[in-house]
Image (spheres, grey):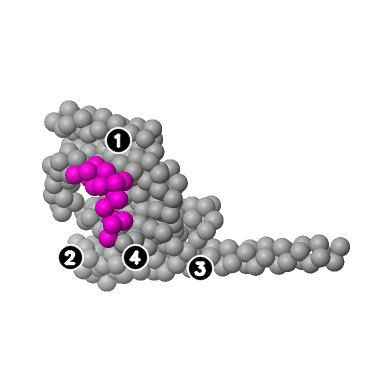
Amino acid sequence: MDIKGYFDKRNLVFLACGVVATFMFYEPLKELTKFSLHSMFYSHIWLIPLVSAFFMFTERKAIFSDSKYSYRGGISLLIIGTILYLLGRKLHVQLNQNDYSSLMTFAGIIFLNGAFLLCYGAQAFKAALFPLFFLIFMVPIPVFLMDRIIHVLLIGSAAATDLLFKITGTPYIREGFTFHLPGISIEIANVCSGIRSSLALFITMVIAGHLFLQTGWKKVVLILAVFPITMFKNGIRIVTISLLATYVDERFLTQSWIHHSGGFLFFIPALVLLGLILWWLKRTEVQGSRIKDKGQRYKEQGKRQF
């Protein structure tokens, strides 16, 4: 694209929408920045638009090959984004910081998507679905939903811990999320749910699926595999620390670096396991493509012989 292309009318309209969005969402985004800096879950938030911009740039030829205005769809999304923004302003006092940031960030993303659809059309919007929808990871998870996700992870982590204690032959008594071992008792609390590593693995697998897989259901399989692997990883970490505290030193439960900062030791094997699943899914795609191509060649040869 030459320099004149950047000053195309539709680009100027999109830029104008961006200026409007900046004025509308400046304060909410400033609040989001403060919130993310003090949150144990959302330190990744400002990496998301950089990843989205990267994919928008690398896929720009496919995205902007046939740009057309889409007034109905674009204006509809702009209106929805504005309504959500006004709703957030009205409910600011009633909402906690997490849910306020969630609503306002979501409103901003809807507004931005509307501006893109308005200026570049449905075909460009469809081609840009991944980088546009990837921005959803900037939205903090509402508290009511986060509580349910953590509870599910706790249930899975407790089940994995229970299984691993049985496999290792460790004597224990279980009461819900509490395990009584010889000399100590451990409780699987919310901080043991692995929600932070789950978010990191989930986002990583979304990117990996987009880069390496073509089949929609295989992308879903890869993403869903994050949850059982996270639960099993949590179980391994809990059992490891518990056994060290029981048979080596009880301070492993309270003062050891492996308890407070050793999560990466268990994160890496989980990432490797997901990488193996990705490799297998990719391999089945390649094999399926080869079989399809071979069948097509046989079909064409049969037609020529006939």
Foreground mark, 2 or 4, reads 4
- Identify residue type, mark 3: Trp
Residue on which disc 2 sits: 255
Considering every residue shown, the one lying at the far bottom of the view is 248
Circles 2 and 1: CB atoms closer than 8 Å: no
Give the residue pinned by disc 4: 267
Can residue 6 be seen in this snapshot? Answer: yes
Q: Earlier in the sequence, mark 2 or mark 1?
A: 1
Locate the C terminus by quadrant: bottom right
Q: Position of residue 177 (x, y in %)?
A: 34, 48
| CB under 8 Å between discs 4 and 1 | no
Q: Which residue is mark 1?
A: 78
Q: Residue flagged by tag 4: what amino acid is it?
A: Phe
> Could you say whether the residue bearing mark 2 is in a helix, strand or loop?
loop
Residue beneath the point at 30% across and 35% down: 78
Question: In this figure, which residue is indicated by the disc labeled 3?
Answer: 279
Whichever of labels 4 and 3 marks the residue nearer the N terminus, that label is 4
Q: Is residue 178 left or right of residue 227?
A: left
**What separation in Å lies between label 4 and label 3 (alpha carbons)?**
18 Å
Which contiguous range is marked in magenta? 3-19
Q: Give the Cα distance between marks 4 and 1.
A: 40 Å
Q: Disc 2 residue type?
A: Gln
In the rendered structure, which amino acid carries the disc numbered 1?
Leu
Instruction: State the CA–CA distance, disc 2 to disc 1.
Output: 52 Å
> How packed is label 2: few (under 14 Cα within 10 Å), some, or many (20 or more)?
few
Element type at mark 1: helix
Q: Position of residue 76 (x, y in %)?
A: 35, 32
Q: Position of residue 141 (x, y in %)?
A: 29, 44
